[in-house]
Structure formats: C-alpha cells, structure tokens
Image (cartoon, rainbow, N blue to C red):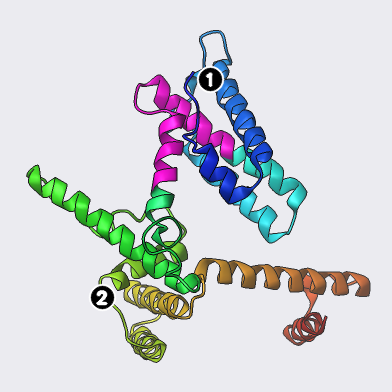
Amino acid sequence: MAEWKETDSSSLAALTRDTSTLADAAESMQSLVETIWRLRQPDGCPWDREQTHESIAKNMIEEAYEAVDCIEQNDEVHLREELGDVLMQVVLHAQIAADAGAFTMTDVARDINRKLIRRHPHVFGDDTGAAKDAREVLEIWDSVKLSEKSDKDSAAVAQGQMPQGLLDGVPRALPALMEAQKVSRKAAAVGFEWETVEDVWAKVAEERAEFEAEDPRSEARAMEFGDMLFALVNVARKEGIDAESALRASTAKFRARWESMEGAAYRKGTPIEGLTADELNELWDQSKRG
C-alpha cells in the first residue's frame, strides 16, 4: 500500500523539532488507512463495503458538528474522540474513491499539503514575513485563491469551456450565516465592497426600511428580512467577526440563562410555563446577574 503522506523529514524536523512525534503520527495514520482498507475488502465488514460517498455524506456533517460542540464546551476529552470520528470519515471517503480508481488518501494528503504551502507564501515562499497579523494573512489567502482561480479559468477557456463562477466554490449546503459570509468575502476580494463599516450599517438601515415597508407575513417581507440579515453579516465580516460563531455563542448564552430560569422556577415549585411575562422577565434579569 502506498504511503499516506508525502513528507520532507528534514524540513519538517527543522520546523517542529520533534521527529519522534511526527513518526508516531505517521505510523498511526498509516494504521488507520490500513484498517479502513481492510474493512472494505471482500471478506471485511458488509456495512463498510456497501457505503458510497452519497450514503455517508451526512455523516461527515454530523461528526463535524459533534466536534464543534466539544470545542464550544471546552471538552478536550471528547474532542479527541470526535476528531477521530471526523478523520475516519475522511479516510473512508478516500478509500471509497480509491476502490473506484478515482484518487487515494495519498492524493488527498499531498494535495492539501501543496495547497497549504502555496497559500502561505508569507511562511514558505518569497514573501516570508509579509503578514503581520491574521487580517493580512486572510488578504494574502484571498489573493492566492484568486490567482489560482485565474489559472483555472485560463485553462478552461483554452479548452473552450466557460470558467467556474466566483461563487461556485462556496457550498450551498453550508449553514446560512456561514454561506453568506463566505459569499460576501469572495465578492469583496474582487472589489465589490463597502469602503467603511459605517457604510454597511447604512445598508442595514436601508434594508430595515424596505423590510418595514412590506406587508406583514408576506413573502416580500421575508425576503427583505433575509436582505437585512445578509447586510448584518457584512458588518460582522468588516469587523473581523465570524457571524456563524457569534450567533452560536449568543444562542448558547441564551440557553444557559434559560436553564438558570428553569432552575429558579423549579426551586419555587412553579413550572416555568405557568409564570407570567413579568415573572419571566424578573427571572431573566436574575439569570443575567449570575
């Protein structure tokens, strides 16, 4: 079986100063690849043999969300397990592709390694030290991706094909806020952008006015609400805030406060559903005070 990873041991050792850890990681990864390969053999596991990219696609999303939940809960014990589940999905998809003669885990690892090096010229290339902070790194990242797209577009045109659209690389299956921020970031990278965050806030106000002008509960009003949310996502992007993470954090905060309210209601011997609006607001204020 081919090695799972393309390595340059001398450069990696110089960067990490821990070759034993790298060797252990390579050995463990190789063992995982071989285990998944074994499960897919004719005398392996019937379930694993039957799986296709389509049949387990949702598993990738579920495992990723479970890992994110551990991160948000600061649960490192279970995070280790959930990251393993995510990695298993990657290796299984690679093995399914290998069985079909499409690509292998070696290809997956080599491609992402090359992409990482290519998209970090401030670390590995001629622009070493060019990025002073995370924002400048994102600017370099967007510039490199645009250059990559330009090369692909030129190749497509040379073959008489229409180039891929700028936004085609953003999956439509992403959570709505995440998709909106990625779409707006790509558009901004080619110059379709507000000059200041104040300009975006003005756009939010404009969208709110259009929302309020539509009939209640109408489809047009719902669409204008979406436009208002999209504008707010751009405020987040301009401020360097991840909109998806920010909303998840706010929702988690609300849940924690609601649980506190339920606890207070339970101690009073009253179901929270039986409290008045004033009583609920009082418990809410108490939960905010901690």
**Does residue 249 appear left or right of residue 105 in this picture?**
right
Q: Earlier in the sequence, mark 1 or mark 2?
A: 1
Q: Residue at x 45, y 30 (%)?
A: 106
Q: Which residue type does callout 2 highlight?
A: Gly
Q: Position of residue 265 (x, y in %)?
A: 86, 73
- Front-lying residue, 261 or 22: 22
Q: Quadrant of residue 281?
A: bottom right
Magenta stretch: give its range. 87-114
Where is 67 relative to 74, above or below?
Answer: above
Q: Quadrant of residue 139?
A: bottom left
Q: How many marks?
A: 2
- Front-lying residue, 262 or 103: 103
Where is 8 relative to 197, above or below?
Answer: above
Residue 273 visible to the viewer: no
Quarter placement of the C terminus: bottom right
Q: Neighbour class for label 1 at 10 Å: few (<14), some, many (≥20)?
A: many
Determine if the magenta segment contains residue 95. yes
Q: Residue at x 35, y 90 (%)?
A: 199
Cβ–Cβ below 8 Å for labels 1 and 2?
no
- Kindly report the distance in space between the C-alpha atoms of the residues bearing marks 1 and 2: 47 Å
Determine if the magenta segment contains residue 227. no
The residue to which callout 2 is attached is: 191
Q: Position of residue 127 (x, y in %)?
A: 38, 64
Q: Which residue type does callout 1 highlight?
A: Trp
Residue 269 visible to the viewer: yes
Q: Neighbour class for label 2 at 10 Å: few (<14), some, many (≥20)?
A: few
**Does residue 145 appear left or right of residue 65 in this picture?**
left
Q: Residue at x 60, y 33 (%)?
A: 26
The residue to which callout 1 is attached is: 37
**Does residue 286 appear left or right of residue 14 in this picture?**
right
